[in-house]
Image: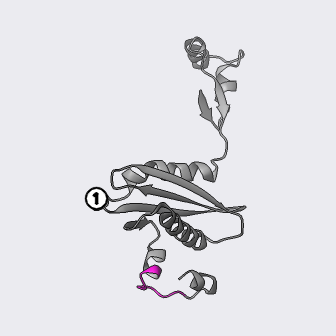
Amino acid sequence: MVVTSFPLGEVVQNQDATGRIVKWALKLMGLGISYAPQTAIKCQVLADFMAEWTETQMPPAVVDKDYWTMYFDGSLMKKGASMGLVFVSPLGVRMKYMIRIHFPASKNVAEYEALINGLCMAIELGIRWLDIRDDSQLVIDQVMKESSCHNTKIVVYC
C-alpha cells in the first residue's frame, strides 16, 4: 500500500497517460499495489511512538537491582491533553500507560499531570525506589527547586 497526499494512484492508473507513465503503469500493474490518501496523525500515534521508542531516545538509566525507571511526557491536543507513562522494572520489563485529560490544559500542566499520575501509579504498584525521567527541563527544574514558577496555575503543581 502506498500512502501519499498526491494523486499518484490516479496518475499511474490513468488509461489516457502517455510516455514514461504508461511504462511505469505496466510494470507496477502486476504487483497489486493499492493507493491510500494520507490522513492526519492523531496524538495517540505520537504518544504510542514515544512509549515504543523511549528506550532508544532516553539516556540509559543507572543499573541497580532496586531501582525502577519512570519516563513521562504530556501532550497537548485540541480537545484536552494526554500523557504517556512508561515504567521499566529492574529486570527490564516495560509497562506502558496512556491517560487522557478531559479538561483544557497547557503543555506544562499536562507534564505535571503526567508526573503526579505516574507517582500515584508507582505507589499503587508498590515501587519504593524510582528514577524519574522527562524531556521538559522546565518541569524538572521547577520540581527540583532550581527554577522559580510565576504562573499561578503551575504554582499549585510545584
Q: Tell me the crowding category of disc 1: few under 14, some 14 to 19, or many 20 or more residues within 10 angstroms, Cα based.
A: few
Q: Hey, which quadrant is residue 12 in on the image?
A: top right
Q: Note whether 103 is above or below 5 in the view shown.
A: below
Up-down relation of residue 29 to residue 111 (above or below):
above
Is residue 75 toward the left or the right of residue 137 in the image?
Answer: right
Q: Position of residue 119 (x, y in %)?
A: 50, 69
Image location (x, y in percent) of residue 11: 67, 25
Q: Main secondary structure of the magenta part?
A: loop
In the shown orientation, is residue 96 left or right of residue 12? Answer: left
Q: Quadrant of residue 145?
A: bottom left
Q: Which residue is mark 1?
A: 65
Task: Pick the residue in front: 21 or 10.
Answer: 10
Residue pictured at 72% horizontal, 16% vertical: 16
Question: Which amino acid is tagged 1?
Answer: Lys
- What is the x, y in percent for residue 37? 68, 35
- Specify whether residue 145 is painted magenta: yes
Image position of 155 (left or right of 132): right
Corner quadrant of residue 134: bottom left
Q: Residue at x 63, y 82 (%)?
A: 153
- Picture quarter with the N terminus: top right
Please state which of residues 62 and 9 is positioned toward the viewer in this rendering: 62
Q: Residue at x 39, y 61 (%)?
A: 69
- Residues shaded magenta: 143-149
Per the image, label 1 sits on a secondary structure element best described as loop
Q: What residue is drawn where x is 72% and y is 61%?
A: 79
Q: Nearer the viewer, residue 45 or 124?
A: 124
